[in-house]
């Protein structure tokens, strides 16, 4: 370069000049113990103030801390400096992001701090290796602190799920929940699992039976195992039922989730009644479950069979938003959901030997299917609007 050419400033110099600008700094999110106490006679609940005051300062804290961390990471990339972000700053950032998210959900201050403490305790257990799983790979700690909390915003805010008949689910002992299947992506099974846990007085875990494809898919199979799912086979189902677990099955399978919108809420064939045979062998009741709302999340207008064969999947749907909007087309439509658990059907009186009688199995399968179908029609009449 020529002698008259000015030297290019170092990255550290550029960052120093930028930091010297006159920028306003917002106050950090105060913990509930640091917030000024409300007047005793005030009638405004604390949860009503959180989405405004706490969220504004939460955003400021996250922004300010993130800016410092990014700057330090940039400095760390410079071989001439040894600056590194302190672990405490990273933890503070994560905690404040969690507080802001919980505040946005309208939780009161006490609940926010309880959730933060439980989350930090969960992280400590994972780091220290305190992990317990059962013979099927079910990790209750992971399910309670990661899997179900991730689903709750969809359940409460997006689909606004209403549940009826949860008292028909036994408080203890084995039982088989049989439900209709629909919606292109199987949100119905996940939200039924959450509904059973959150709405049932005993907060029972629904152990779901899934197709081979679920467990053959990388990452998805691991999540399914950890959250309590297992392969949809009679031996696994019977072992769970005999162990006193609550088991969920969606016998329509891919025929249900992949059917066109024109066939919505028309139940497909329930297979050969394998789920009924499992319940008969274990001597547990069958609880019919009807789900309205999933059909409208991704209305299937058509299919791309050639693409499906290339990908090795049962179907690749064409919906009003996919593939036209790309990844945005994967966002489900906010339909209104209703889930109803029907009266349990007793199988103990028939005895385990009834599982070997095809006529008994087919009759009981048809009875469960017809119960679910009629309940679907009733719920559709009850629902005021698809999206309201």
Image (spheres, rainbow, N blue to C red):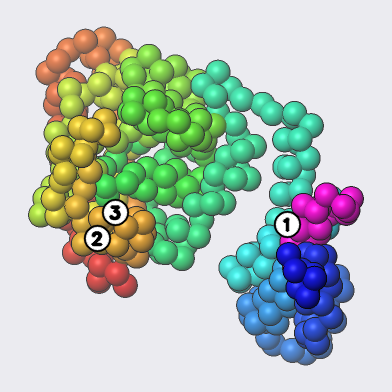
For this view, does 121 lie left or right of residue 377? right
Secondary structure under tag 1 reads helix
Residue marked by disc 2: 324
Q: Are marks 2 and 3 in contact (CB under 8 Å)?
A: no
Q: Judge whether 59 appears above or below 294 on screen.
A: below
Name the one closer to the observer, 40 or 51: 51
Q: Which residues are magenta?
A: 66-85
Q: Is residue 87 visible?
A: yes
Residue marked by disc 1: 94
Identify the disc placed on residue 294. Answer: 3
Task: Tell me the crowding category of disc 1: few under 14, some 14 to 19, or many 20 or more residues within 10 angstroms, Cα based.
Answer: some
352 falls in the magenta region: no
Q: Is residue 30 visible?
A: no
Identify the disc placed on residue 23. Answer: none
Whole-number angstrom distance, CA of label 2 to CA of label 1: 36 Å
Q: x, y (%) of residue 92? A: 80, 59
Q: Quadrant of residue 42?
A: bottom right
For this view, does 206 lie left or right of residue 92? left
Secondary structure under tag 2 reads loop
Q: x, y (%) of residue 232? A: 34, 24
Mark sitting earlier along the chain (2/1): 1
**Residue shown at 54%/44% (left/top)?**
147
């Amino acid at each position: 370069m020529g002698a008259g050419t000015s030297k290019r400033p170092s990255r550290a110099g550029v960052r120093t000049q930028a930091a010297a600008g006159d920028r306003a700094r917002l106050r950090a999110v105060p913990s509930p113990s640091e917030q000024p106490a409300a007047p005793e006679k005030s009638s405004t609940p604390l949860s009503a103030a959180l989405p405004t005051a706490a969220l504004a300062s939460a955003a400021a804290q996250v922004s300010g801390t993130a800016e410092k961390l990014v700057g330090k990471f940039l400095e760390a990339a410079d071989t001439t400096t040894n600056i590194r972000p302190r672990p405490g700053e990273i933890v503070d950032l994560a905690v404040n992001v969690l507080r802001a998210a919980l505040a946005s959900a309208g939780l009161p201050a006490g609940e926010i701090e309880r959730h933060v403490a439980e989350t930090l305790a969960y992280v400590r257990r994972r780091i220290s290796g305190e992990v317990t799983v059962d013979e099927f790979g079910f990790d209750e700690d992971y399910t309670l602190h990661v899997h179900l909390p991730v689903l709750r915003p969809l359940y409460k805010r997006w689909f606004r799920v209403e549940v009826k008949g949860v008292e028909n689910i036994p408080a203890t002992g084995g039982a088989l929940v049989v439900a209709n299947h629909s919606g292109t992506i199987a949100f119905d099974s996940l939200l039924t699992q959450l509904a059973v846990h959150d709405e049932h007085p005993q907060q029972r875990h629904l152990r779901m039976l899934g197709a081979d494809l679920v467990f053959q898919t990388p990452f998805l199979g691991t999540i399914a195992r950890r959250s309590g799912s297992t392969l949809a086979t009679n031996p696994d189902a019977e072992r769970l039922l005999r162990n006193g677990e609550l088991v969920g099955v969606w016998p329509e399978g891919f025929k249900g989730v992949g059917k066109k919108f024109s066939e919505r809420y028309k139940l497909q064939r329930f297979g050969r009644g394998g789920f009924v045979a499992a319940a008969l062998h274990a001597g547990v009741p069958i609880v019919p479950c009807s789900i309205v709302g999933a059909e409208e999340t991704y209305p299937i207008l058509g299919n791309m069979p050639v693409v499906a064969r290339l990908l090795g999947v049962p179907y690749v749907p064409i919906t009003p938003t996919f593939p036209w909007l790309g990844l945005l087309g994967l966002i489900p439509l906010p339909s209104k959901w209703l889930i109803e658990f029907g009266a349990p059907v007793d199988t103990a009186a028939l005895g385990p030997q009834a599982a070997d009688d095809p006529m008994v199995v087919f009759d009981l399968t048809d009875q469960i299917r017809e119960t679910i179908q009629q309940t679907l029609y009733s719920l559709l009449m009850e629902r005021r609007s698809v999206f309201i």
